[in-house]
Amino acid sequence: MNFISALSCFGLLLAAAAAQAPKPCVVPHLMSGSFSLMDANGLYMSTGTLSYDAFGQRMRVRNFELVGNQTAFLDQLMLFEQGAECK
């Protein structure tokens, strides 16, 4: 009797595990964040922000780089719907 009960419980657990369907990831409609990078020597440093807009299908990246004593700034706009990139 115990064997049949254990086998039934195992069968129910197996059926419950098999019935769970994977769910696709949900992407947020608006997302923003920041990043900061530095190498081990401290000669290269980069910091910036990232903004993503799923409604307008665009992403903007602002990046400030410091390499040695030289600086650079990059403002990049990617328009996915038009397939264009502006720097």
Image: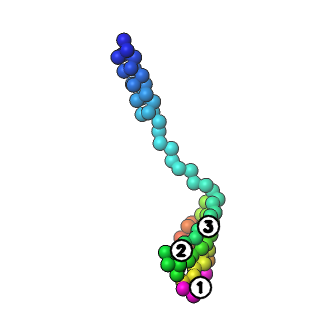
Magenta part of the chain: 68-74
Residue 67: percent from left, percent from top: 54, 83
Instruction: Give the amino acid at mark 2.
Output: Met
Residue 34 shows which numbered tag?
A: 3
Q: Residue furthest left?
A: 3
Name the image quarter holding the C terminus.
bottom right
Q: Are marks 2 and 1 in contact (CB under 8 Å)?
A: no
Element assignment for label 1: strand
Using the image as rendered, state which of residue 63 and residue 40 is in the foreground. Answer: 40
Q: Residue at x 63, y 56 (%)?
A: 29
Residue identifier under label 1 = 71
Choose the circle earlier in sequence order: 3 or 1.
Answer: 3
Q: Residues within 10 Å of mark 1 (few under 14, many from 20)?
A: few
As drawn, the label of residue 32 is: none
- Going by the numbered disc 3, the residue's amino acid type is Ser
Magenta stretch: dominant secondary structure: strand
- What is the quadrant of residue 63 in the picture? bottom right
Residue farthest to the front, as pictured: 41
Q: Secondary structure at mark 2?
A: strand
* SS type, badge 3: strand
CA distance for labels 3 and 2: 14 Å
> Does residue 74 show up?
no
Let me know if residue 69 is in the magenta part. Answer: yes
The amino acid sitting under disc 1 is Thr
Q: On screen, 22 above or below 15? A: below
- The residue under the point 55% across, 67% down is 80
Find disc 2 in the rendering and name its residue. Answer: 38
